[in-house]
Image (cartoon, coloured by chain):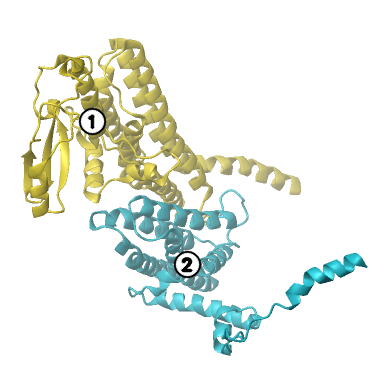
Chain colours: A cyan, B yellow
Amino acid sequence: MAEADGSSRAFLGLSDVSISEDIPVEGDISMPPTSSLQDDGFSTLDEPVKDTVLRDLKAVGNKFVHVLYPKKSKALLRDWDLWGPLLLCVTLALLLQGGSVDSKDDGGPQFAEVFVIIWFGSLIITLNSKLLGGTISFFQSLCVLGYCIMPLTVAMVVCRIVLLGGSGTVSFVVRLVVVCASFGWSTFASTAFLADSQPQNRKALVVYPVFLFYFVIGWMILTFAPAQ
Amino acid sequence: MNRGDNATMLPSPKKKCFLVSPLGVSQVSPMDNTDELKFQDFEEVSNLLSLDPNATTVAVSDSLASLSGEEDVKLDLNEDEEGLENSKLLGETPTGGFWTFDYYQSFFNVETVQVMDRLKGSVMPIPGRNFVKHYLRNKPDLYGPFWICVTLIFSVAISGNLSTFLSQFGDQTYHYRPQFHRVTIAAIVIFMYASLVPLCAWGFLTWRRGAEGQMGCYTFLETVCVYGYSLFIFIPTSLLWIIPLEWLRWLLILVSTVVSGSVLVFTFLPVVRDHTKLTAAITLLTILILHSLLAIGCKMYFFHTAGHMAAPLTTTLPMMTTQGTQAH
């Protein structure tokens, strides 16, 4: 009892503490009302999945258009992504399957070989351009090289359609023309983006590996022989 | 501290100060020459700097500025300093350790014109010219050897495929095959040649140099560079190998081996000259033999002629005839 009294007496002084009337206290502790637009800009967790997927697909499609009409725009470089290259690489590798599979040894490139050539080829070219002192960043360069495979993938689709009609000399000539055109297009498109990042006296050193890379991919497409 | 004590210390070399600016280089002398340790007042420097704030001051030690042999005691130190600076100027010491990106960037410090020059030098061996001293000039690069090897891999595989196709052109039963596995084999063979053989050559020559204490050998990078550039002539050779004439192919092997072999021989001749005649001859012969083995091996494997393709056909024919007789 005595202790309770003592403790209550100790706390007695505290209850008397109050802000005296002559010191005015001002302020507003209520949250300012945030607009709903500001909220959506930061968090995309609440949007439906369809919106997320469509937004990424639109970005990829936008870059495809940039490759088709290669102007020197910064959009491809600034918002790089690797979805497009992955899609193109898998499509190309799948289309290169189903070739002459009667002999494992002498057939065309396997799926893994195409994959490795495309990704390691892009990696080595990117490293080469960075070692030569390029100002483009690592993933931007991978992005550009991957997206510029698109004309060659289109050529592969055309070649397979042409091969459905037969594999004589005429179809070979048609395929040759299509592959050459798309190879030139790919090289031109990628150098339009990559060559700017190099000093003048090293441009050819950077362009040649790109040329070799698309030449090898074009060769793989041209020599695709369907199973008989 | 009186002047007597100074005799026990090694005085530092007299330093001259130069003011470097876009306007020119002017020499600035310190006001007080007698005691180097005192704070020196460079009035002229401050005047000149006020004229051109972007100029830099460079201190050049006296022995470099004027070759004076007065202070013999200090010359040893200065020679070491000079030696270090000279080696830095002549050699490409890469900055940073081997785990940094800058280390590898120093190996790619070439321009298009330089690469073209080196390629030209690799196909035109002139007896007096040493490839390393004349073209590389202590700036070896890895760009040339690497991309020459990659191009050679694909040119050999593609040309081999084309030559096989052309040799079977009239044959109705022949079904074209891309033979993509050849790329893998070519890659392994060529990259191993381009990296292991220079390693052996460099190791052997360095060991001999260490044993006899002769002049400096080439660095490992320079050896790799020479070997890489010497492979360049095989690229047009492999394209010409598509032509299905046997004698032409052997002639091409001879010509290309002689050309690239002589580039290698002229490069290694000065280094090997100090050895005994027998060792020198054996070293150079080994280099040439390995080089020609590569050429011949590529030709034999990748450029099958009709003779090789006929072998499996002859083995299948007896089987078919025996089956035919059994059916009867």
Residue A166 lies left or right of residue B94; in this view the side is right
Residue lying at 35% horizontally and 67% vertically, measured from the top left:
A193
Residue lying at 89% horizontally and 65% vertically, measured from the top left:
A3
Identify whether A204 is placed above or below A20: above
Mark 1 lies on a secondary structure that is helix
Identify whether B59 is placed above or below A137: above
* Relative image position of residue B280 (x, y in whole percent): 30, 15
What amino acid is found at the position of numbered circle 2 in the picture?
A: Gly
Nearer the camera: disc 1 or disc 2: 1
**Does the image show residue A177?**
yes
Confirm or deny contact between disc 1 and disc 2 (CB under 8 A): no
Residue carrying label 1: B85
* Relative image position of residue A210 (x, y in whole percent): 38, 58
- Chain letter, disc 1 residue: B
- Residue B103 falls in image quadrant: top left
Q: Which of A172/B264 is in front?
A: B264
Residue carrying label 2: A168
Q: Which of B250/B178 is in front?
A: B178
Q: Which of A19/B105 is in front?
A: A19
**Does the image show residue B241?**
no
Mark 2 lies on a secondary structure that is loop
